[in-house]
Image (cartoon, rainbow, N blue to C red):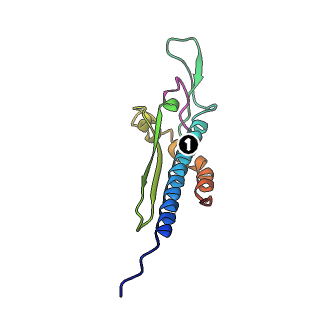
């Protein structure tokens, strides 16, 4: 006995629903990426409590970050040089996987995060994740609309 074929109307409805959900998944990934970027901007701004230095080629001074604080902004390169993306892998037979990310394009970002033999770490990555987590949870728990 062969299984009954689904009517064309049902196939089309399923196809349209899958397309709609995939669009919403990609949209949520983009919104999560934006939430991470907004959290990054918040974490990397504000006053710090480290030593005071003179800005190079200037009479102005700035306060550096103390060990354990997120990096202070001197020229703003770390705060401004971020890219992000959303990767979606959809499989009708299994679950859909969404990866939303941001990453710094500043060459010294890893040195600030992890420290070196000469400077103590100025961790910021976990703080960005913690700051964005409530918004990410809210975005990902929304109902899918038809």
Quick check: 2 left or right of 80? left
Q: Main secondary structure of the magenta part?
A: loop
**Quarter of the view holding residue 107:** top left
Residue 40 horizontal/vertical position (percent): 56, 39
Considering only vertical position in the picture, is 2 above or below 98? Answer: below
Q: Residue at x 44, y 41 (%)?
A: 114
Residue 143 horizontal/vertical position (percent): 62, 61
Residue 56 horizontal/vertical position (percent): 50, 15
> Residue at the front extreme?
8
Classed neighbour count for the residue bearing mark 1: other residues with Cα under 10 Å, few (<14), some (14–19), many (≥20):
some
Residue 139 horizontal/vertical position (percent): 60, 53
Residue 70 painted magenta: yes
Residue 25 painted magenta: no
Front position in the image: 4 or 121 = 4
Magenta span: 69-77
Front position in the image: 11 or 68 = 11
Q: Residue at x 40, y 37 (%)?
A: 116
The residue beneath circle 1 is 34
Q: Which quarter of the figure is the C terminus placed in? A: bottom right
**Quarter of the view holding residue 138:** bottom right
Q: Which quarter of the figure is the N terminus placed in? A: bottom left
Quick check: 50 left or right of 4? right
> Residue at the bottom extreme?
1
Which SS class for mark 1?
Answer: helix
Front position in the image: 76 or 136 = 136
> Residue at the left extreme?
1
Considering only vertical position in the picture, is 52 above or below 122? Answer: above
Considering only vertical position in the picture, is 46 above or below 12? Answer: above
């Amino acid at each position: 006995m062969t299984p009954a074929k689904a009517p064309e109307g049902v196939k089309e409805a399923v196809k349209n629903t899958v397309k709609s959900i995939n669009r919403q998944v990609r949209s949520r990934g983009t919104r999560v990426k934006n939430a991470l970027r907004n959290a990054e901007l918040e974490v990397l701004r504000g006053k710090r409590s480290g030593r005071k230095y003179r800005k190079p080629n200037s009479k102005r001074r700035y306060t550096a970050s103390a060990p354990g604080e997120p990096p202070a902004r001197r020229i703003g390169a770390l705060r401004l040089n971020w890219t992000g993306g959303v990767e979606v892998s959809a499989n009708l037979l299994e679950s859909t996987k969404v990866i939303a990310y941001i990453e710094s394009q500043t060459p010294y970002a890893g040195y600030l995060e992890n420290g070196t033999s000469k400077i103590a770490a100025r961790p910021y990555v976990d703080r960005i994740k913690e700051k964005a987590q409530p918004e990410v949870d809210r975005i990902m728990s929304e109902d899918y609309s038809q």
